[in-house]
Image: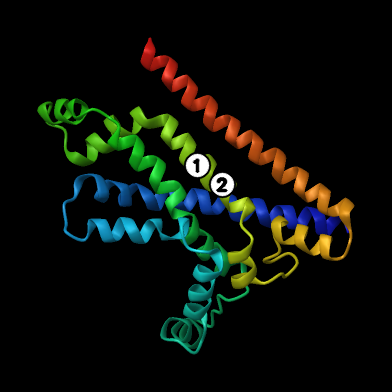
Amino acid sequence: MYIDFLQTLWVTFKLAGLTTIILMVVCLPVIYCLTFCKFFLKPIVEALISMPMVLPPSVIGYYILVLYSPRNAFGALLSSHFNINLAFSFTGILIASIVFSMPFMVQPLLSGLRSLPDSLSEAAYTLGKSKTVTFLKVLLPNIKPSIVTAIALTFAHCIGEFGLLLMVGGNIQGETRVASIAIYDEVQELNFKSANQYAFILFALSFILLSLIYGANKKSEVWKVI
């Protein structure tokens, strides 16, 4: 039982950690394009990225599960050519978690970039810096609180997700069983002691992450005043 408990926590934190790291890398070119590139489909792209914030997790989970199905082109391609079945696997819930958590990484970073004065970019361009260098070495270092917020929110959102993971990954011990699903199972079995252990760990971690976010933002406000 104790091994199952630790295994469930390991899957939970591994999923949240990998999701956050991958999104931090993937979202940099995304926010670069949304900040510097001008194209008429930009509002549609932003809307698609933000959809997981307003849609029920079960809706996203259903479409991802349909995409994974061998009865559809993508799932059939993976199954027949690579012998890969993403449904009810850790890789499957990782991809689903990345899709579902993307707006929690993108929105704080975009808000931080859009709050910066234009003079920063203009000064860098005057010195002969390219857009890429300006983005990486001038703009990003000036939105550190937004970066902290994006990382903390993404991680916290991942460890608390339930419906999407249950639909896409099921409840396989050591593979797709995460703490949020374990809490539901333990309550169904009237095992409140174990449910409380999972719940307390998630509660404490979420509290720490939110404190980190508010602390970083408060520090930023103090420096602006100074």
At mark 1, the secondary structure is: helix
Residue 195 visible: yes
Residue depicted at 51% across the width and 70% down the height: 59
Residue 24 visible: no
115 above or below 190? above
> Residue 91 at x, y = what percent?
56, 67
> Residue 85 at x, y = what percent?
56, 79
Image position of 163 (left or right of 177): left
Quarter-of-image position of residue 57: bottom right
Per the model, the C-alpha gap separating discs 2 and 1 is: 6 Å
Image quarter in which the C terminus is found: top left
Q: Residues within 10 Å of mark 1 (few under 14, many from 20)?
A: many
Residue depicted at 35% across the width and 61% down the height: 48
Residue behind mark 2: 155
Residue depicted at 16% across the width and 33% down the height: 129
Residue behind mark 1: 151
Image position of 123 (left or right of 70): left
101 above or below 141? below
> Residue 88 at x, y = what percent?
63, 74
Report the amino acid beneath label 1. Ile
Image quarter in which the N terminus is found: bottom right
- Kindly indicate whether the residue at mark 1 contacts the one at mark 2 (C-beta within 8 angstroms): yes
Report the amino acid beneath label 2. Phe
